[in-house]
Amino acid sequence: MVRRSADGRVEVLSSIVASQIADHAPYGGVVPEIAARAHVEVIDLVTAEAMAAAGVEYADLTGIAATAGPGLVGGVMVGLSFGKAVALARGLPLVAVNHLEGHALSARLGADLPYPFLLLLVSGGHCQLLAVAGVGAHRRLGTTIDDAAGEAFDKIAKALGLGYPGGPALERLAEGGDPGRFELPRMLLGRAGCDFSFSGLKTAAARLAETVISDVERRDLASAVQAAIARQLAERTDRAMVQYARDHEGRALRFVVAGGVAANRAVRARLEETAAARGFSFTAPPLAYCTDNAAMIALVGAERLAAGMVDGLDAVARPRWPLDEAAAANRPTHPAGRKGAKA
Ligand code: KG4
Ligand code: ZN
């Protein structure tokens, strides 16, 4: 729950995260049916907990924000239906929020961050560079042509026999490792544009993981993987910064990294260096708002509500919902119905 004051300041009143990680862990990844059921089981309890923690009653609410996509549609439908029911029962406006816009604005939860800014959105399902001009105004500069960075972390971690989710586990394993011991492919190095590719790295690392046996080798491989992912993120971001600076001549240059992978310290450090070298300020959300959370969705809801951007009760749950619909339509990285990046 968030409160937005007339001056635009947003305060987080509560943000409750009901994790399903333990439900999915035995299967080594997210099981859609389990995800949907787990949402139904806790949605009313989590809402009550969030309201109690914020000290508010239904009568205090001025609007309802609910995620409408993109993502596993079972869980999205549960949250959206619940949001619609509360909006209908209480006569409140509904804002159907794009999960990615939540990540895009999440850095504004921890810092005074004006528009516009260049955003690197790196999560389990997405890896994109976006120029963010304001609420609902995003232009995509680059995206992954295969896996998302978080997906690469998760799959390589799995090959190394680490638990799910793999990103944080791989970061722990990599601590103190020698990133130079194993050579990994440098995907798209020097290639024009700002797109990403992680599949070659994933395959090479998985193959090495089969041969690597000692604990020290495992640690060094994890360290090399983390460094390779951080390096590609920084190299492609560097290109986007050049382009963005050209388009925003004479304006303040701001760079933001958001999404689950932004929690990774090596990734942050690498990006911070890149930003400094290009004259960009660097902002990352507080750790709790890097990975999926409700506060970032409420923030988008509050900002959209203030701008008069509300949705009808006929809003639909969308498994795919790119932030920059025009860019996605012009150059779809994954045709409809294929597995892969969701935007
Ligand atoms: O944003 P998020 O919570 O969910 C999505 O919308 O995808 O991101 C989850 C992803 C997972 O792939 C997870 O392994 C990765 O973020 N992640 C990390 C770290 N913490 C989370 N990857 C690397 N290092 C971390 N510390
Ligand atoms: Zn997310």
Image: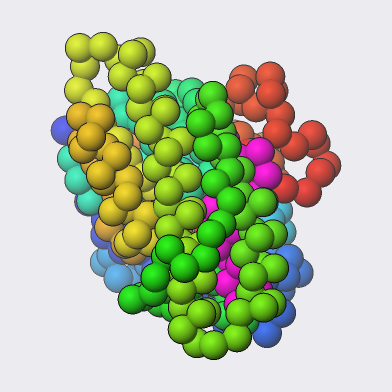
Give the magenta part as a residue range.
142-160
* Residue 67, position as x, y percentages in the image: 54, 49
| Residue occupying the far bottom of the picture | 214
Q: In terms of depth relative to the viewer, which is nearer, 206 or 36?
A: 206
Q: Is residue 332 at all visible to an observer of this figure? A: yes
Quadrant in which the C terminus is drawn: top right
Q: Is residue 259 above or below residue 116?
A: below
Question: What's the residue at 69%, 68% (across, down)?
Answer: 207
Q: In terms of depth relative to the viewer, which is nearer, 14 or 275?
A: 275
* Residue 6, position as x, y percentages in the image: 19, 34
Number of labels in the image equals 0
Question: What's the residue at 79%, 34% (across, down)?
Answer: 335
Horizontally, residue 22 falls left or right of residue 227, namely right
Q: In terms of depth relative to the viewer, which is nearer, 57 or 316?
A: 316
Quadrant in which the N terminus is drawn: bottom left
Horizontally, residue 269 falls left or right of residue 5, namely right
Q: In terms of depth relative to the viewer, which is nearer, 40 or 332?
A: 332
Question: What's the residue at 72%, 48% (across, down)?
Answer: 340
Q: Is residue 103 magenta?
A: no
Q: Is residue 25 above or below residue 204?
A: below
Q: Is residue 145 magenta?
A: yes
Q: Is residue 283 above or below residue 280?
A: below
Instruction: Tell me where residue 197 sits by quadrant.
Output: top right
Q: Is residue 2 at all visible to an observer of this figure? A: no
* Residue 180, position as x, y percentages in the image: 43, 63
Instruction: Tell me where residue 328 sits by quadrant.
Output: top right
* Residue 20, position as x, y percentages in the image: 57, 75
| Residue occupying the far right of the picture | 337
Instruction: Tell me where residue 294 sits by quadrant.
Output: bottom left
**Colour setting:** rainbow
Horizontally, residue 161 falls left or right of residue 255, namely right
